[in-house]
Image: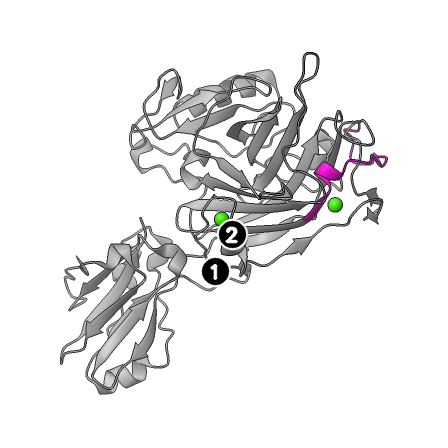
């Protein structure tokens, strides 16, 4: 088989890295057909398969995603009461128990596809449950905090926000706010500032579609809703520069006006479960120039660490107090590219190439030679995850191109 490393190296897309993985390729060689599969590298980190999740309140699409669990009720974990106050902001603070079933996280999951992060929460009580009356407007937060560079020297430690048990290195959030009895907004946050001057610089960066991953703090953060449309009354106030000039952002504050951007959430009919999506693009791009080729902060092939918290005010809680529940983080989550594989070779000589169902939208490309390759999209491959190829007598090379 002709070495293809150099051809691959000409691209930036993680999904195109080459591993000859399938033992059936030897069969193919006997048939005088050399099949090169360009798939994701194998990582030592937690490499979960990609899944396509629909944000619709039906949780059957999560069935094959691995679960993580958090204690219930008055249980203590790592010396920290399960649901607790958020009054502390030091690493050594030991919070006290607050009875607040709505934020009592029991189970959580995380997955991704080629362009989105997805989080799943199951609570003992009702997610997003907030009071609304003449004098009270309740607050509820579904929070996913991400160490986007797998580096504890950037970002902040959870304790600064009153979240325990604490872990470190969190740079950005995807979160959803419920306020005064309704879903209010889904937004991104950047925790890469430790003072007002750095915060001002971060706002300027984000207006230009840039996030710098820097040492940060809980206290100083821009918070924005991303819209896949130009600015307007119900969308952004800042149009973004190319290559994101189809989009706009609006800086938001908690308890503010309601906006529907690209971070979305759906609850189960009983309110115990939530599924949430945050597209990669809302995490913006790094500061390299020109900006049109700046790298996305979140993309396939990266390894991230992920913390889950539920947090709410206390009007509807038996304990009557603000409380939160933070889970053990998912460490070393590898954003695996879709896997291209040969799923069958029929006696008729037909070859079935397939890739993850969650990666529908990717394009299968083929070339007949790796010398001056002419990669052509296999017709119809963009709407399926399986293509049948009639094997001839020459060579054929395949790769999967993610959107
Ligand atoms: Ca669903
Ligand atoms: Ca819990
Ligand atoms: Ca970090």
Tell me where the magenta segment starts and ends, as one range.
88-106
Q: Quadrant of residue 337?
A: bottom left
Q: Main secondary structure of the magenta part?
A: loop
Q: Find the distance from the CA under tag 1 to the CA under tag 2.
A: 8 Å
Going from N to C along the chain, the mark reached first, 1 or 2, is: 1
Determine whether, in the image, residue 398 is placed left or right of residue 191: left
Where residue 124 is drawn, which disc sits there?
Answer: none
> Is there any visible trace of residue 79 in the rendered image?
yes
Q: Which residue is pictured at 47% across the width and 35% down the height?
A: 263
Residue at image location 14% in from the left, 78% down from the top: 392
Mark 1 crowdedness (10 Å alpha carbons): few <14, some 14-19, many ≥20: some
Q: x, y percentage for residue 26? A: 30, 84
Between 246 and 303, which is closer to the camera in this rendering? 246
Whether tag 1 and tag 2 are in contact, CB under 8 A, the answer is yes
Judge from the rendering whether residue 312 lies leftward or rightward of residue 252; answer left or right.
Answer: right
Q: Is residue 403 above or below residue 340?
A: above
Whole-percent x, y for residue 398 in the image: 25, 66
Asked if 96 appears above or below 332 in the picture, the reply is above
Membership of 103 in magenta stretch: yes
Q: Residue at x 38, y 60 (%)?
A: 357
To which residue does mark 2 refer? 111
The residue under label 1 is 49
Task: Say left or right for 57 vs 17.
Answer: right
Q: Nearer the viewer, residue 301 or 78?
A: 78
């Amino acid at each position: 088989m002709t070495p293809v490393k150099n051809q691959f190296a000409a691209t930036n897309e993680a999904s195109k890295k080459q591993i000859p993985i399938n033992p059936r390729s030897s069969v193919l060689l006997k048939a005088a057909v050399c099949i090169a599969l360009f798939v994701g590298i194998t990582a030592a980190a937690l490499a979960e398969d990609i899944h396509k999740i629909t944000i619709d309140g039906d949780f059957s699409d999560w069935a094959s995603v691995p679960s993580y669990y958090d204690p219930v009720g008055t249980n203590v974990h790592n010396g920290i009461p399960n649901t607790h106050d958020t009054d502390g902001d030091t690493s050594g603070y030991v919070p006290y128990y607050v009875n607040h079933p709505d934020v009592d996280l029991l189970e959580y999951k995380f997955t991704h596809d080629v362009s989105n992060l997805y989080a799943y929460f199951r609570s003992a009580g009702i997610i997003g449950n907030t009071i609304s009356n003449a004098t009270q407007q309740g607050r509820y937060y579904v929070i996913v905090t991400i160490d986007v560079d797998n580096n504890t020297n950037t970002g902040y430690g959870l304790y600064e926000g009153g979240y325990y048990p604490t872990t470190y290195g969190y740079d950005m959030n995807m979160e959803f706010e419920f306020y005064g009895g309704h879903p209010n907004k889904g937004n991104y946050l950047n925790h890469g500032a430790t003072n007002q001057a750095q915060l001002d610089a971060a706002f300027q960066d984000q207006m230009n579609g840039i996030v710098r991953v820097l040492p940060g703090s809980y206290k100083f953060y821009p918070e924005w809703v991303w819209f896949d449309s130009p600015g307007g009354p119900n969308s952004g106030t800042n149009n973004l520069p190319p290559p994101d000039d189809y989009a706009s952002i609006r800086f938001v504050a908690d308890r503010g006006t309601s906006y529907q951007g690209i971070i979305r959430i759906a609850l189960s009919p009983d309110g115990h479960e939530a599924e949430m999506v945050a597209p990669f693009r809302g995490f913006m791009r790094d500061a390299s120039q020109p900006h049109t080729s700046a790298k996305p902060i979140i993309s396939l092939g990266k390894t991230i660490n992920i913390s889950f918290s539920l947090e709410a005010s206390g009007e509807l809680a038996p304990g009557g107090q603000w409380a939160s529940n933070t889970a053990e983080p998912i460490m070393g989550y590898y954003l695996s590219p879709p896997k291209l594989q040969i799923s069958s070779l029929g006696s008729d000589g037909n070859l079935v190439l397939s890739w993850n169902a969650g990666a529908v939208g990717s394009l299968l490309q083929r070339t007949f030679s790796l010398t001056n390759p002419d990669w052509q999209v296999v017709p119809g491959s963009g709407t399926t995850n399986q293509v049948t190829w009639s094997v001839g007598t020459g060579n054929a090379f395949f790769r999967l191109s993610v959107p």
